[in-house]
Amino acid sequence: MAEGVPAYRRDRLRLPAAQRRRQIVEVTRRLIAERGFWGLSMQDVADGCGLTVQGLLHHVGSKDGLLASVLEHAEIEDALQLAVQLGTGDSDLTGDPVDGTAPGVVDLPQVCAAIVRRNAVQPEIVRLHAVLAAESLEPRHPAHAYFLARHRRALAALSELAKPLSRDPESLARQILATMDGLELQWLRDPDNADLVREWEAASALIFGQAGT
């Protein structure tokens, strides 16, 4: 074998399909969080998994298919973590705020606090979403429609819960999402000096205090 060939090429392991897909997702998620989708190459993902590009394509079909797999996996993890924080088990919850929660189980402050607590324990997923959400403001980005739909679902769900608290529930929901997004960016940039949960508690006291007036 030629000198300089990486060890993972020589010693590539055969993994079960489900385990391989999870590996691909994890490697891709890390690379996107570091470089963004536009800076991601299929070769880098393949190298990180010990595959050829052709072998990688066998599992994901295309670069857009790879991105779809990553987003789907992140949404499932989001849902499970949110269910844990809300104490609702792993039932119908999706990755979007309160989408699928049973009526009357939780109120808006509880849901918001649960979302923040969930995000505080999964910085890699929050970073992934932050990078992709910024990139996908470009309409030609393959995740543009996904993040627009995700935002609209979150806004609608929070607006519904905000109805007992505000005469303009959609405006209140927008303020909540904007505050969460801003605090998350500050936390991701300087996690040693920003406590996401504590900062949200301070901000929510102002938001919900004013909403009740």
Image (cartoon, rainbow, N blue to C red):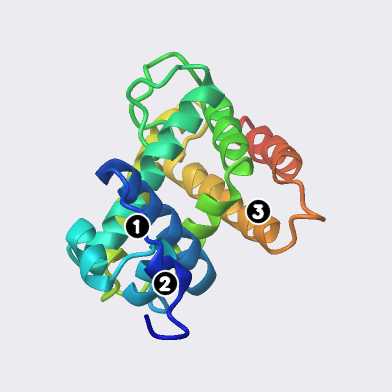
**Rendered image: mark on residue 183:** 3
Q: Residue furthest top?
A: 104
52, 141: nearer the viewer = 52
Rendered location of residue 101, percent (x, y): 38, 23
190, 6: nearer the viewer = 6
Q: Mark 2 or mark 3: which is in front?
A: 2
Q: CA distance from mark 1 to mark 3?
A: 19 Å
Q: Residue furthest front?
A: 1
**Rendered image: mark on residue 147:** 1
Mark 1 or 3, nearer chain start:
1
The image quadrant of residue 3 is bottom left
Rendered location of residue 120, percent (x, y): 63, 42
Residue 134, above or below 17: below
Quadrant of the snapshot with the N terminus: bottom left
23, 154: nearer the viewer = 23
Q: Residues within 10 Å of mark 3 (few under 14, many from 20)?
A: many
Which residue appears at 29% of the width and 53% of the height? 69
Mark 2 or 3, nearer chain start:
2
- 199 lies left or right of 128: right
Type of amino acid at the residue the image marks with label 3:
Leu
Can residue 78 be seen in the rendering of this structure? yes
Q: Pointers 1 and 2 in contact (CB under 8 A)?
A: no
**Rendered image: mark on residue 135:** 2
Type of amino acid at the residue the image marks with label 1:
Phe
The image quadrant of residue 153 is top left
Which residue appears at 57% of the width and 30% of the height? 114
Q: CA distance from mark 2 to mark 3?
A: 19 Å
Rendered location of residue 138, percent (x, y): 34, 75
